[in-house]
Image: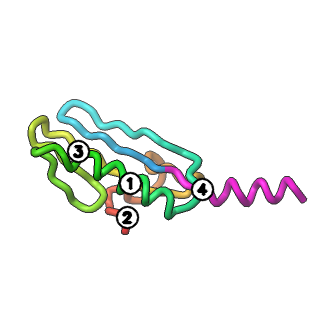
Amino acid sequence: MKVKTIEIILALAWTLWIRTQTPTSDTWSAAPGLPSQEKCAASIKEKLDTWRQFKDAVFNGNSVTFTGNNSTMLYVCLPETEDPRKGPANPLEPQK
């Protein structure tokens, strides 16, 4: 019974994916293990709020573009079992 409980907990974990695009690179990084979609969304808000102090930051949904160096950071919350680097899902759509 405990094994099933652990499987359920793992299935409910969320990952904050961060896509960083620059003129010369396009990379993804993951911050896994968030306990809920709400915690993941709160983490996105916290990260975006960090960038608000930069004068060249332009916000669009869950992304921020820095006009000074033409780089963009996109934040996406997905269940831990999903990977935006694989499959047909379109991670570029802002999460609401």
Magenta-highlighted residues: 1-15
Q: Which mark is residue 72?
A: 3
Label 3 Cα neighbours within 10 Å, binned few <14 / some 14-19 / many ≥20: many
Label 1 Cα neighbours within 10 Å, binned few <14 / some 14-19 / many ≥20: many
* 2 horizontally vs 27: left or right: right
- View extreme (right): residue: 1
Q: How many angstroms separate mark 4 from mark 1 (CA)?
A: 14 Å
Counting labels gives 4
Closer to the chain start, of discs 3 and 4, is 4
Closer to the chain start, of discs 3 and 2, is 3
Closer to the chain start, of discs 4 and 1, is 4
Provide the major secondary structure of the magenta segment.
helix
- Label 2 is placed on what type of residue? Gln
Q: Is residue 9 above or below residue 27?
A: below
Q: Is residue 36 magenta?
A: no
Q: Is residue 77 above or below residue 28?
A: below
